[in-house]
Structures are given as C-alpha cells and as structure tokens.
Image (cartoon, rainbow, N blue to C red):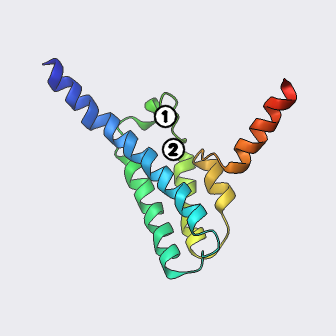
Amino acid sequence: MTFALGQMFLKALLDPIIDLKKEVGRIAYALDFFDNQRESDAASMRFRDHACRLRELMNTIFLYDVWQPLFHLPRKEDVYEASADLIGHSNGNDFRTEIRKLLLITTYDDIVRERAKRKRDI
C-alpha cells in the first residue's frame, strides 16, 4: 500500500514538476543558444514550441498554486505571461529579460552581481 501511494505521488506530482523545471532549463538554454539568431526559422519554431510546452506542463501539475512556493516554481500568471513573451520572441521581438525574470532563470550577470555583493559585504 505504501509503495503504491508513493508511486502515485511520484507520477501525479513530482514527475510533472520535474518536467516543468526541465522545460524552464531548456528555455534558458534556447535563449542563450539562439541569442543572435532570433529571426531564424529554427529559433522561431523552438520558441513557439517552448511556449506551448510550458503551458502544457504547468497544467499537468495538480493543485499548482499549492505546490508553487514549496518547489520554487514560477507563479501561474508568470508562466502564462512568459509563454506569451516566448511567442513574441519567436516573432523577432526581444523578450529575453522578461522571460528570464518571469521563469526565475538565473543569468550569468545575476551570478556576477551576487558575487560582487558578497565581496562588498565581507
């Protein structure tokens, strides 16, 4: 019984959360990889795919709003907005900064700023 309940918990909750986090990672990768190729057909299709997949994965998480703070997931509204921004980005607009902020993606610049701040605080 315990094993069955554990498997249900994994399949119903943890797997979709992990899939969503992986998708956010793929988006972070694509934003960097296609940085100077935004208007290529491949980049456009990739960003549109990510926009659709992001909404799909978020909607598979049962009681998303309950688990969002516990698993450090982006807010539901932010996922929808990031999805719309990804579509806009696929059309040649530059929404990289907004998408990263909405999906809680840490950038290299964020790391450098945090490191400099820690050094000042010491």
Q: Which residue lies furthest to the left in this view?
A: 1
Between 85 and 27, the residue placed more toward the observer is 27
Task: State which tag comes first along the sequence, 1 or 2.
Answer: 1
Residue drawn 66% across the image and 63% down it: 95
Q: Position of residue 8 (x, y in %)?
A: 21, 31
| Element carrying mark 2 | helix
Residue drawn 37% across the image and 46% down it: 19
Q: What is the C-alpha distance between the residues marked 1 and 2?
A: 8 Å
Q: What mark, if any, has residue 76 been given in the picture?
A: 2
| Element carrying mark 1 | loop
User: Which quadrant holds residue 87?
Assistant: bottom right
Which of the two discs, 1 and 2, sits closer to the camera? Answer: 1
Quadrant of the drawing holding the C terminus: top right
| Residue located beneath label 1 in the image | 68
**Label 2 CA crowd tier, 10 Å (few <14, some 14–19, many 20+):** some
1 and 2 marks in contact (CB < 8 Å): yes
Between 25 and 116, the residue placed more toward the observer is 116
* Residue 83 showing in the rendered view: no
Q: Where is residue 75 in the image (x, y as percent from the top left)?
A: 54, 41
Q: Where is residue 104 in the image (x, y as percent from the top left)?
A: 60, 44
Between 116 and 63, the residue placed more toward the observer is 116
- At label 1, the amino acid type is Gln
Image: 1 above or below 34? above
